[in-house]
Image (cartoon, rainbow, N blue to C red):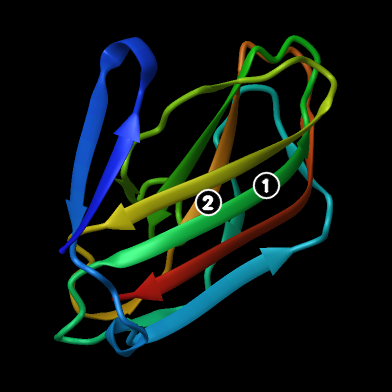
């Protein structure tokens, strides 16, 4: 186990223990990316990128997902909510939490997402990265997005 120690000012220290991950623990890596402009219609959840199918082997315990979105926010936007879904559709299960990130209206912004799917199951699996604009009265525009899935 690796022991990490973080200091959080007035909240005091946080200790975190994690087992080391070796390259041999990675069973497969897949990704999806786009550089094609995509409209984010006001406050509708929109899929911005979907990973290629990743094979979850019987020994895989989790999937690490790393995502990136370059977006121009729409008028009135106060926050962006990135979400990762287990599958290629909006109705698929949410992986992790959907936490809003403060954003200004009509500006270029970037989102980074890091989540772990602790219950990926076995077989072929795809993941999607979605974005929602909060309080937007105008459409946003995604200019680039990527999602990497790493089976561990």
Return the residue nearer the eye: 52 or 150. 150
Determine whether label 1 and label 2 are within 8 Å by CB.
yes
| Residue 51 sits above or below residue 45 on the image | below
The first of marks 1 and 2 along the sequence is 1
Residue 129's disc is 2
| Residue 31 sits above or below residue 39 on the image | below
Give me the residue at 15% from left, 85% from top: 59
Identify residue for label 1. 69
Residue 139's image quarter?
top right
Answer few, some or many: residues within 10 Å of disc 1's Cα (few below 14, many 20 plus, some between 14 and 19).
many
| Element at label 1 | strand
Q: Which quarter of the rendering shows the C terminus?
A: bottom left
Give me the residue at 58% from left, 38% from top: 131
- Horizontally, residue 83 falls left or right of residue 58, namely right
| Residue 46 sits above or below residue 61 on the image | above
Residue 142's image quarter?
top right
Residue 31's image quarter?
bottom right
Return the residue nearer the eye: 107 or 45. 107
Residue 41's disc is none
Q: Where does the image place residue 100, in percent across and percent down from the top left?
A: 49, 23
- Horizontally, residue 132 falls left or right of residue 83, namely right
- Horizontally, residue 103 falls left or right of residue 83, namely right
Q: Where does the image place residue 50, in percent across and percent down from the top left?
A: 55, 63
- Horizontally, residue 91 falls left or right of residue 3, namely right
Distance from disc 1 to disc 2, alpha carbons, whole Å, reads 9 Å
């Amino acid at each position: 186990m690796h022991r990490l120690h973080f200091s959080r000012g007035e909240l005091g220290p946080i200790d975190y223990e994690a087992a080391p991950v070796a390259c041999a623990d990675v069973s497969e890596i897949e990704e999806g990316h786009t550089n094609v402009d995509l409209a984010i219609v006001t406050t509708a959840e929109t899929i911005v990128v979907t990973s290629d199918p990743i094979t979850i082997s019987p020994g895989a315990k989790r999937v690490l997902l790393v995502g990136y979105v370059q977006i121009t926010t729409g008028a009135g936007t106060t926050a962006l909510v990135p979400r990762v879904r287990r599958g290629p559709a909006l109705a698929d299960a949410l992986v992790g939490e959907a936490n809003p990130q403060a954003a200004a209206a009509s500006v270029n912004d970037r989102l980074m997402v890091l989540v772990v799917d602790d219950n990926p199951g076995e077989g072929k699996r795809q993941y999607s990265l979605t974005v929602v604009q909060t309080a937007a009265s105008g459409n946003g525009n995604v200019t680039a997005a990527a999602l990497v899935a790493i089976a561990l």
